[in-house]
Image: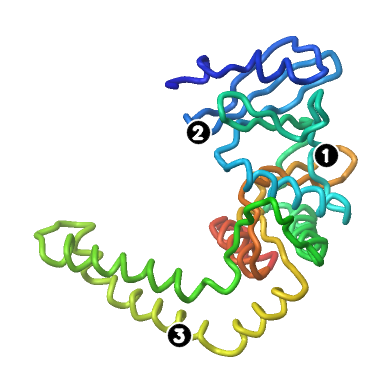
């Protein structure tokens, strides 16, 4: 399968009680894709998901839980068999409503406040979530120390084998000079995660439940004319402490040079 044209979209969409006027591709890779589906009632979004069927069941369960608890997520359209997804050629497809609106701006104090508030609501709404027995959840809870140790040692091996032992100009010399400092700082950060604060937070969320979007940023949010903020791209929702989302959002915000005056 080399292009979106080879996708069996007509067969997929025939599973839904909708009239298709046009199809426009938004993005495509072999294992996943996004298409705009025009119908007489407006646009819908069709997604080919890279997750397995069992993981997709988990994702859809998280969406139902969050929606029930007040988070605005585009409605998943059920097919003729009342299923939330359709399988064609062993691939899973999900059809949902398209939301009209705009991407919120970090440069607007009111919209930035709305983003941060909605993230807090997202985490609060996830309380009590338990994955169903027939699903395969994404889980990062309690794995930070092991994961980060692996990442930093991979970087250290690259530094020693590919940079330190070779003649490199410009960027190579910069890495030689700066990497040891960052490596030391990373080790101290990992050491900090070995303290009681991280362990206790993990234990708390293991009991109460907590879902993280993993990319809760302006690009995955739509501010509707009604003022509601909709959360998009839920394919990567995982079980973890709220800090996983908070650090990602802060990284996005702090890259904007004019944002510091607001926080």
Mark 1 or mark 3, which is nearer to you?
3
Question: Where residue 19 sits in the image (x, y, percent)?
Answer: 80, 12
Residue 123 appears in which quarter of the rendering? bottom right
Say whether residue 100 is visible: no
Q: Which image quadrant: the C terminus?
A: bottom right
Q: Nearer the viewer, residue 225 or 119?
A: 119
Q: Earlier in the sequence, mark 1 or mark 3?
A: 3
Q: Residues within 10 Å of mark 1 (few under 14, many from 20)?
A: some
The mark closer to the camera, 2 or 3, is 2
Instruction: Give the alpha-carbon distance from disc 1 to disc 2, as whole Å.
Output: 30 Å
Question: Are the residues at dot 1 and dot 2 in contact (C-beta closer than 8 Å)?
Answer: no
Residue 181 in the image: x percent, y percent?
A: 32, 77
Distance (Cα) linking label 2 and label 3? 38 Å
The numbered dot on residue 191 is 3
Give me the residue at 81% from left, 54% from top: 66
Q: Earlier in the sequence, mark 2 or mark 3?
A: 2
Quadrant location of the N terminus in the rendered image = top left
In this view, the residue in front, 205 or 100, is: 205
| Res 224 label | 1
Q: State the SS at label 2.
A: loop
Query: Is residue 36 something that shows in the picture?
Result: yes
Pointer 1 and pointer 3: residues touching (CB < 8 Å)? no
Residue shown at 72%/79% (left/top)?
204
- Circle number at residue 92: none
Q: Secondary structure at mark 3?
A: helix
Separation of residues labelled 1 and 3 (CA atoms)? 43 Å
Q: Residue at x 79, y 57 (%)?
A: 118
Indicate which disc residue 31 carries: 2
Instruction: Name the quadrant containing residue 80.
Output: top right
Q: Residue at 60% across / 90% down in the picture? A: 196
Q: How many marks?
A: 3
């Amino acid at each position: 399968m080399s292009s979106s044209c080879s996708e069996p979209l007509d067969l997929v969409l025939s599973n839904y009680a909708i009239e298709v006027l046009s199809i426009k591709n938004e993005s495509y890779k072999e294992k996943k894709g996004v298409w705009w589906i025009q119908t007489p009632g407006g646009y819908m979004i069709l997604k080919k998901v890279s997750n397995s069927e069992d993981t997709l069941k988990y994702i859809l369960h998280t969406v139902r839980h969050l929606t029930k608890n007040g988070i605005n997520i585009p409605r998943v359209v059920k097919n003729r068999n009342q299923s939330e997804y359709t399988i064609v050629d062993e691939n899973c497809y999900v059809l949902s409503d398209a939301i009209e609106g705009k991407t919120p701006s970090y440069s607007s104090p009111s919209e930035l406040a709305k983003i941060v508030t909605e993230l807090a609501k997202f985490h609060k709404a996830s309380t009590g979530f338990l994955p169903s027995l027939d699903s395969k959840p994404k889980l990062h809870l309690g794995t930070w120390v092991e994961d980060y140790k692996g990442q930093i040692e991979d970087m250290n091996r690259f530094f020693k084998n590919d940079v330190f032992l070779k003649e490199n100009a410009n960027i190579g010399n910069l890495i030689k000079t700066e990497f040891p400092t960052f490596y030391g700082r990373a080790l101290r950060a990992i050491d900090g995660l070995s303290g009681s604060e991280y362990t206790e937070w993990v234990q708390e969320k293991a009991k109460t439940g907590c879902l993280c979007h993993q990319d809760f940023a302006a690009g995955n949010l739509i501010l509707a004319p009604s003022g509601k903020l909709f959360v998009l791209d839920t394919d990567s929702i995982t079980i973890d402490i709220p800090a996983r989302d908070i650090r990602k959002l802060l990284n996005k915000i702090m890259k904007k040079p004019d944002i510091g005056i607001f926080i």
